[in-house]
């Protein structure tokens, strides 16, 4: 195997990955969500199966038997038995617009930025070894492949550090398809589709190796027998379930939700609940499928390779050791797929965490660095994420280089799992315990991470450090792998101690202070409640007085309206509502509805929820949050006013007393109102008075406008007298009285309407004038077209007549030449006769082509569409052209097809035969291939591909012109330059587009697009022709020849007599009949153009007079479909002039054979 094969395979695979991602993004941009989306989502979750799964699981099985199953049992348990937990996490993430696991933890603990930042740092620390694992897998895979074929010293520069190249390439891929939008909640459909495809690739590759091991390298029985008798295998698979197994099971159960890449694919990329339901069984099924062959491959590796090869490399080394290079490349692509999927998704998820929770909070606190409105913030966000991706991948590469290549893949993976498991106490306790707060979450994660780093990370990075033997400060009980004297498996030891410290600190520090109001609010969202969504409002005792509720509502509605509304409510409900009375659930519900009419239902619920929090804890904190909510509402009102100031219309809101409560800047500009008029409480009448005083409206308009506008809804158009502006005023009623008034400047629109009206008045005259001109032009055009058609018809008739007159002597000459060749085959003049015959055939070809072009241009050739199988037609062409191809030494190949097309059988055959003939003629060596591709819709493409001389790109259009031949083509083969002209015209008649692509010096591809029929029944096949007995033997055959040209009769007599026939010659039917009284002829050869009538009428009279079954052949220069149809209806064969003697002899022999068979 050459090294470049590995490079090409990897590059092609990555290019396919790019193409799939691009396809997914394009479909998403077009708004197309495929029905297979739940399956794609479920497969994308298999990003969990990294190179650890593809390579490392076999290594674990070779060392510790079935302990590799632990990291798959955990996820299977979560998805099969805890689907509600998964759905709950997804639901919470969607509701809170959460994009990462760090965001989830930060949102749970009062939207705490420090908690999210700390989680991001831990995720980065845990992910770097995992990224290094993938780079190690790729690098060792490449090295293993090359080690079987090239010495290490001879490796190209690329392979000296393939991990760096892969890291950079995958970083670029993640940037292209993972950071296209600043909104991290927007689904990356291209990325998801690519990851799903990689899941299929790695499963297929691993299964291919496993099947080869079980059914190619061994049989199942042989492998089982050898495994059960091998001491090494028996020892490896006899290990019991130890502490590391349970630790790995626990860590994998946490990792399936908490790993940044798993959280991204499971939660962020989820669209519907149906996707989760599909993944509940499809993802565990995938985990089972990809582990079916782990044990057989591990056993085969032990048997065949022993200790010579690291168990992590058995998947690659087994095919290589047994010469199966193809399978080795497939296995390499599988390991590459497993590694790239993890690298891409992990880097994207971590980059979002870095930008959202580390970088942007720092930048936003220093607002002097960011000028809001002058800079596009999305560019900054995307730049941060892209830089973070490159930095993360580079850190993984550095760790890989520093850690060396001796650590097993599984060990690195479990190290990362244990780091991410430090999220588990804060995550799961945060979903179950309201008392957990940000202080406890931070303390727990810090403590757990420190213990993890001391007990697991340091032994992996510094395996030979004295600290591992002596302990911290020389204290034996502080040894990292036996802390406090615990003698446990290393993984179980580090996992239990770190999670125990994490949980203890979380609980202890959470109990050290009460949660803040914001933390309690977020806890109420994340922690399940026994009551419904409005539980706070359904309690009979609220601890809040009516006066406090009214004071809160009044801050948004005003004291007067609040008092009036509460009084009306008390009367209708017959409730005593003194300010000191405790507000019950009915008061709270009414207050929510009342407040919602002003600030919306969501905001009203938030305000009242904060009010009800006061009796639970710090009133100061609750009031501060309430003030924050008020500031937010005021901010929203300011934003609303700013937005309304940007619209073109003037806008005003009047209450039920028609007093101004809200307006925008355009209202004062359009009505030219002074500042004192545009104040809250200004009556509508004052606005109209000001407009009258300024001279914009008169007294009559003033009186009418108030009456009209107050009868809402209303529409009024007013022309302002002083400014000349035309305005349109619309009013719409408010639900509780009052109206909304909009003012639009209609000046330009009215001017345009007036101009349009004026234009319409003169339109009729212009239309009439233009119509007259058009009629005259059309009449002149029709007359010119008639003249052109007449000239074309005249040209066609002239060519047809001239062709007939020329073909007559040409026909006679060909017959004489043929007779001379056959009678004097061994004389010196035979070669001269053959040259004459060849020259006559060239003249015949020129005349035939010119006549065909004339008929096609005149519309005399009409297609007769039919449904027929394409394969027989192609085989006919192959039979016709096979001798020419064999003579030139060119391979002519027709790819079989089952297509049924709708076309004209004869015209299509002629079109294709011209193209195939050209391909053979202009191919000096190589091959010509004719095949069919399925095109768009109900069409197929018939392609003729050759390896000939090719056509320069600038001459691809000129080749279809008459008598056009390229210089190189003239030197290669003889021709007239009319074949492609006929092809183009036939294609136009059939409506079969012809396209051509060519590379000069390398070959040409012609494509003919033909409609296809898939819904018809079986196509009838043409019965084979009756076999002719005594083929081509015409001795003693009596032949009647009727032709009005004496020269042709004489030539026919010479030719037929030479074949042993008895010939009767006549210039017309009356001349022939007396000569037939003694003996009926065996066959009649009749010219079409006779002096009296035509040949078909003569044949019909002959049959009526002497023999109804008389065989007859019509010989003519007429090629029209009408003549062919008439001859077919009489059962008469047609041979066209100039007559080919071989064709005549074959036709006569066929008729003789049929007649003898009938007798």
Image: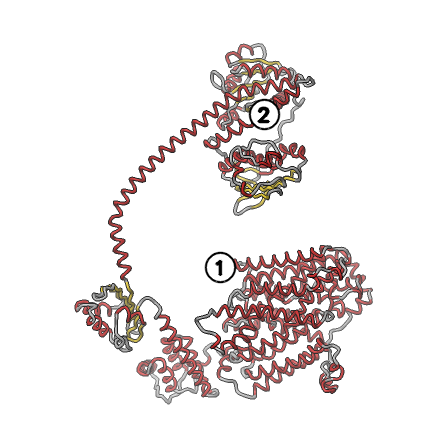
Check contact, mark 2 vs mark 1: CB within 8 A: no
Gap in angstroms between the C-alphas marked 2 and 1: 63 Å
Which residue of the protein is positioned furthest toward the bottom in this rendering? 580
**Quadrant placement of the N terminus:** bottom right
Q: Secondary structure at mark 2?
A: helix
Other residues around mark 2 within 10 Å, as few (<14) / some (14–19) / many (≥20): some
Query: Is residue 328 or residue 145 the one in the foreground?
Result: 145
Other residues around mark 1 within 10 Å, as few (<14) / some (14–19) / many (≥20): few
Q: Secondary structure at mark 1?
A: loop
Dividing the picture into quarters, in which one does residue 715 lie? bottom left
Q: Which residue is mark 1?
A: 31
Q: Which x, y percent locates residue 364?
A: 49, 76
Q: Which x, y percent locates residue 23?
A: 55, 57
Q: Which x, y percent locates residue 573?
A: 34, 81
Is residue 368 among what the camera can see?
A: yes
Mark 2 or 1, closer to the camera: 2
Coloring basis for residues: secondary structure
Q: Which x, y percent locates residue 411?
A: 71, 72
Is residue 898 among what the camera can see?
A: no
Query: Is residue 95 or residue 105 the one in the foreground?
Result: 105
Image vertical order of residue 228 relative to residue 811, above or below: below
Q: Which residue is mark 2?
A: 841
Relative side of 232 to 722, left or right: right
**Quadrant placement of the C terminus:** top right
Relative side of 929 to 864, left or right: right
Which residue of the protein is positioned furthest toward the front in this rendering? 967
């Amino acid at each position: 195997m050459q090294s470049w094969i590995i490079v090409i395979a990897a590059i092609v695979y990555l290019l396919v990955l790019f193409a799939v991602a691009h396809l997914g993004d394009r479909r998403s941009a077009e708004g197309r969500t495929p029905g297979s989306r739940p399956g794609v989502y479920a497969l994308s979750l298999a990003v969990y199966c990294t190179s650890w799964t593809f390579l490392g699981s076999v290594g674990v099985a070779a060392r510790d038997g079935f302990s590799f199953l632990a990291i798959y049992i955990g996820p299977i348990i979560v998805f099969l038995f805890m689907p509600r937990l998964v759905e709950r996490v997804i639901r919470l993430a969607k509701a809170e617009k959460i994009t990462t696991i760090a965001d989830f933890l930060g949102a749970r603990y009062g939207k705490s930025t420090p908690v999210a930042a700390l989680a991001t740092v831990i995720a980065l620390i845990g992910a770097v070894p995992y990224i290094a694992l993938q780079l190690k897998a790729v690098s060792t895979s490449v090295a293993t492949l090359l080690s079987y074929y090239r010495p290490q010293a001879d490796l190209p520069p690329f392979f000296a550090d393939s991990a760096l190249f892969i890291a950079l390439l995958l970083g670029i891929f993640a940037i292209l398809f993972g950071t296209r939008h600043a909104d991290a909640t927007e689904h990356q459909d291209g990325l998801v589709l690519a990851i799903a495809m990689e899941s299929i690739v790695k499963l297929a590759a691993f299964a291919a190796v496993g099947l080869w091991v079980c059914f190619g390298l061994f049989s199942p029985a042989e492998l089982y027998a050898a495994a059960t008798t091998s001491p090494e295998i028996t020892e490896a698979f006899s290990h019991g379930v130890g502490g590391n197994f349970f630790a790995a099971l626990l860590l994998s159960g946490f990792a399936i939700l908490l790993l940044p890449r798993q959280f991204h694919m499971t939660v962020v990329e989820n669209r519907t609940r149906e996707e989760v339901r599909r993944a509940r069984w499809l993802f565990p099924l995938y985990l089972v499928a990809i582990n079916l062959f782990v044990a057989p491959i591990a056993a085969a590796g032990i048997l065949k390779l022993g200790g010579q090869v690291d168990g992590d490399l058995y998947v690659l080394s087994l095919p290589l050791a047994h010469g199966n290079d193809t399978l080795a490349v497939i296995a390499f692509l599988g390991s590459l797929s497993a590694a790239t999927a993890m690298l891409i998704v992990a880097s994207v998820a971590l980059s979002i965490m870095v930008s959202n929770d580390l970088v942007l909070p720092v930048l936003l606190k220093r607002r002097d660095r960011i000028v809001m409105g002058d800079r596009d913030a999305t560019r900054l966000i995307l730049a941060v994420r892209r830089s973070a991706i490159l930095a993360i991948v580079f850190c993984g590469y550095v760790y890989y280089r520093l850690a060396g290549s001796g650590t097993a893949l599984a060990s690195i993976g479990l190290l990362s799992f244990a780091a991410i498991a430090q999220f588990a106490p804060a995550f799961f306790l945060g979903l179950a315990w309201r008392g957990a707060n940000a202080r406890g979450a931070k303390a727990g994660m810090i403590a757990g991470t420190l213990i993890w780093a001391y007990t697991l990370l340091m032994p992996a990075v510094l395996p030979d450090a004295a600290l591992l033997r002596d302990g911290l400060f020389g204290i034996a009980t502080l040894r990292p792998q036996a802390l406090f004297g615990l003698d446990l498996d290393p993984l179980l030891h580090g996992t239990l101690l770190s999670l125990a410290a994490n949980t203890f600190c979380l609980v202890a520090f959470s109990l050290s202070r009460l949660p803040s109001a914001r933390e309690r609010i977020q806890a109420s969202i994340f922690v399940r409640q026994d009551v419904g969504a409005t539980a706070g409002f359904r309690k009979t005792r609220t601890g809040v007085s009516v006066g406090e509720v009214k004071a809160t509502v009044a801050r948004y509605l005003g004291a007067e309206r609040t008092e009036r509304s509460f009084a009306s409510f008390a009367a209708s409900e017959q409730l005593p509502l003194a300010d000191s009375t405790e507000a019950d659930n009915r008061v709270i519900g009414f207050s929510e509805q009342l407040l919602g009419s002003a600030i919306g239902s969501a905001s009203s619920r938030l305000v009242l929820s904060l009010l009800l929090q006061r009796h639970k804890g710090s009133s100061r904190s609750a009031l501060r949050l309430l003030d924050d909510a008020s500031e937010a509402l005021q901010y929203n009102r300011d934003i609303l006013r700013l937005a309304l100031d940007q619209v073109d219309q003037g806008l005003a809101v009047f209450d039920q007393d028609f007093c101004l409560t809200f307006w925008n800047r355009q209202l004062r500009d359009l009505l030219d109102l002074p500042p004192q008029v545009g104040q809250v409480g200004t009556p509508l009448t004052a606005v109209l008075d000001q407009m009258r005083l300024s001279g914009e409206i008169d007294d009559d308009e003033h009186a009418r406008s108030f009456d009209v506008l107050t009868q809402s809804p209303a529409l009024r158009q007013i022309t302002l007298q002083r400014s000349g502006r035309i305005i349109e005023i619309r009013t719409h009623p408010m639900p509780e009285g009052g109206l909304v008034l909009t003012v639009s400047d209609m000046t330009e629109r009215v001017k345009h309407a007036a101009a349009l009206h004026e234009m319409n008045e003169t339109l009729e005259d212009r239309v009439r004038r233009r119509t007259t001109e058009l009629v005259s032009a059309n009449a002149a055009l029709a007359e010119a077209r008639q003249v052109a058609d007449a000239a074309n018809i005249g040209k066609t008739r002239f060519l047809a007549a001239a062709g007939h007159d020329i073909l007559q002597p040409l026909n006679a000459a060909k017959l004489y030449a043929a007779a001379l060749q056959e009678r004097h085959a061994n004389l010196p003049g035979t070669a001269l006769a053959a040259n004459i015959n060849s020259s006559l055939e060239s003249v015949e070809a020129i005349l035939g082509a010119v006549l065909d072009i004339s008929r096609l241009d005149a519309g005399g050739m009409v297609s007769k569409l039919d449904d027929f199988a394409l394969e027989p037609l192609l085989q006919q062409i192959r039979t016709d052209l096979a001798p020419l191809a064999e003579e030139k030494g060119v391979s002519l190949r027709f790819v079989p097809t089952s297509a049924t097309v709708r076309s004209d059988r004869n015209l299509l055959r002629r079109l294709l035969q011209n193209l195939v003939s050209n391909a053979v003629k202009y191919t000096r060596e190589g091959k010509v291939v004719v095949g069919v591709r399925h095109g768009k819709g109900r069409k197929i493409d018939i392609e003729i591909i050759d390896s000939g001389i090719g056509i320069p790109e600038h001459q691809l259009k000129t080749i279809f012109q008459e008598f056009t031949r390229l210089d190189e083509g003239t030197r290669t083969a003889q021709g007239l330059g009319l074949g492609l002209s006929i092809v183009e015209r036939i294609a136009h008649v059939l409506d079969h587009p012809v396209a051509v692509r060519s590379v000069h010096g390398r070959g040409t591809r012609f494509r003919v697009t033909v409609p296809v029929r898939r819904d018809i029944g079986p196509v009838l096949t043409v019965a084979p022709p009756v076999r002719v007995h005594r083929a081509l033997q015409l001795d003693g055959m009596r032949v009647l020849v009727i032709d009005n040209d004496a020269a042709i009769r004489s030539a026919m007599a010479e030719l037929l007599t030479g074949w042993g026939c008895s010939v009767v010659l006549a210039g017309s039917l009356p001349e022939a009949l007396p000569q037939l009284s003694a003996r009926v002829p065996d066959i009649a050869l009749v010219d079409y153009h006779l002096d009296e009538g035509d040949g078909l009428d003569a044949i019909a009279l002959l049959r009526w007079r002497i023999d109804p079954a008389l065989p007859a052949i019509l010989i003519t220069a007429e090629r029209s479909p009408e003549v062919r149809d008439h001859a077919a209806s009489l059962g008469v064969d047609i041979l066209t002039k100039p007559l080919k003697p071989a064709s005549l002899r074959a036709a006569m022999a066929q008729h003789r054979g049929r007649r003898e068979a009938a007798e």
